């Protein structure tokens, strides 16, 4: 797969993840925050996990990696591990909600990037550098 095509697929998957993050936050979580629910940590996890899941599905399907079992083993583990940090920081008072959102955007990008790494994923011709 050419480098520009991988970059395009990655960018589209990242934008789909951000749109999901925004939509789930606006439609579901903010309404539940107003009700003063006791499960704030779970509520903070919902938009992150939804965004990362959309990213993984879009990138996996578009790049052809969704058919490999290693992708579905590695992607959820890495992204879930990374996504636990933002809600904890907000609830412990180390970050504001805005900083948490910026952190979530970074987690969608870098978590998706880590999940999509593959040594032979980008085939670059050896003649291109000569």
Image (cartoon, rainbow, N blue to C red):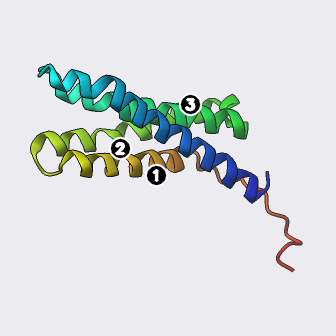
Q: How many marks?
A: 3
Q: Is residue 11 above or below residue 125?
A: above
Q: Residues within 10 Å of mark 3 (few under 14, many from 20)?
A: some
Give the labeled residue for mark 1.
Answer: 110
- Quadrant assignment, res 57: top right
Closer to the eye: label 2 or 3: 2
Location of residue 124 in the rendering, given as x and y in whole percent from the top left corner: 79, 62
Are discs 2 and 3 less than 8 Å apart at CB? no
Report the residue at 48% width, 50% height from top: 109
Cα–Cα gap, marks 2 and 3: 16 Å
Q: Residues within 10 Å of mark 1 (few under 14, many from 20)?
A: some
Report the residue at 62% width, 29% height from top: 69
Secondary structure under the numbered disc 3 in the rendered image: helix
Quadrant where the image shows the C terminus = bottom right
Are discs 2 and 1 less than 8 Å apart at CB? yes
Report the residue at 66% width, 31% height from top: 66
Q: Upstream in the sequence, badge 2 or badge 1? A: 2
- Quadrant assignment, res 88: top left
Q: Upstream in the sequence, badge 1 or badge 3? A: 3
Q: Is residue 84 visible?
A: yes
Q: Is residue 123 above or below residue 12?
A: below
Q: Upstream in the sequence, badge 2 or badge 3? A: 3
Cα–Cα gap, marks 1 and 3: 17 Å
In the shown orientation, is residue 118 left or right of residue 74? right
Q: Which mark is residue 72?
A: 3
Cα–Cα gap, marks 2 and 1: 9 Å
Closer to the eye: label 1 or 3: 1
Location of residue 105 in the rendering, given as x and y in whole percent from the top left corner: 40, 48
Q: Is residue 76 visible?
A: no
Give the labeled residue for mark 2.
Answer: 82
């Amino acid at each position: 797969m050419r480098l520009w095509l991988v970059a395009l697929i990655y960018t589209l998957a990242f934008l789909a993840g951000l749109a999901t993050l925004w939509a789930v936050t606006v439609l579901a979580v903010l309404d539940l925050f107003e009700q003063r629910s006791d499960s704030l940590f779970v509520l903070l996890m919902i938009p992150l996990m939804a965004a990362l899941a959309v990213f993984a599905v879009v990138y996996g399907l578009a790049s052809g990696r969704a058919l490999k079992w290693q992708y579905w083993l590695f992607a959820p583990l890495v992204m879930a591990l990374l996504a636990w940090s933002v809600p904890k920081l907000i609830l412990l008072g180390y970050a504001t909600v805005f900083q948490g959102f910026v952190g979530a955007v970074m987690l969608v990008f870098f978590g998706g990037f880590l999940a999509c790494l593959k040594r032979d994923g980008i085939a670059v011709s050896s003649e291109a550098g000569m």
